[in-house]
Image (cartoon, grey):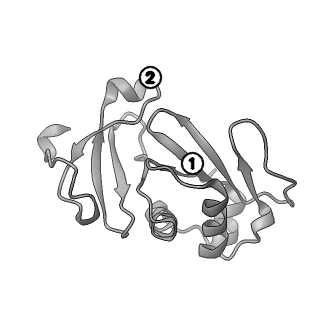
Amino acid sequence: MRDYTVTFIESVDLEALAGAAAEAFTMPREQIEVWDGQGFAGAVAEPVLAQVAAGSGPGAFAEFVGFDAFAHHTGAPDHLTVAIALATRVQKRAIFPPESLEDYQWTLVAADGSHGQVVLDSDLLDEGTISIVGAVEPIAGASDLRVIGAEGL
């Protein structure tokens, strides 16, 4: 099962995110669920290709989740391609996890599409809070992040 979860760490309108996903990946908008944390925004046509939802915890404002049907519909792009397409269209920063959830080094994609590895606070992440400690290397669109290098891992 392929999982495309992209978490937005800045406030983003859920409908705008769903529209951006539909545009970026040539998907019918009605095949993207929108969950505001309390209910679905409306009826969705089958098969559901993706879901846009309110963030699941502190530091997470919204999440895009692409399902197996999304991978099939889009030709299974890599995770970074999906994150860049979404972040640049809504002009918000997003992160996505590494292959191993035991690794606290995630990928941040800035609104301009620049990207790089960031380190999350492992204790806070275990509690469900996203908090970036710093960047492994400078990220052009996230120059406000402290660069901690590989020793921060």
Q: Earlier in the sequence, mark 1 or mark 2?
A: 1
63 to the left or right of 153: right
x, y percent for residue 84? 44, 67
Residue 63: which numbered mark, if any? Answer: 1
Residue 9: which numbered mark, if any? Answer: none
x, y percent for residue 62? 56, 47
Q: Amino acid at mark 2?
A: Glu
Q: Amino acid at mark 1?
A: Glu
Q: Nearer the viewer, residue 11 or 131?
A: 11
Q: Which residue is mark 2?
A: 127
Residue pictured at 44% horizontal, 38% vertical: 59
**CA gap, disc 1 to disc 2?**
18 Å
89 to the left or right of 44: left
Q: Nearer the viewer, residue 41 or 83?
A: 41
x, y percent for residue 13? 59, 55
x, y percent for residue 28? 77, 71
Residue pictured at 15% horizontal, 49% vertical: 147
The correct choice, above or below, for 99 with respect to 110 in the image is above
Quarter residue 152 falls in: top left
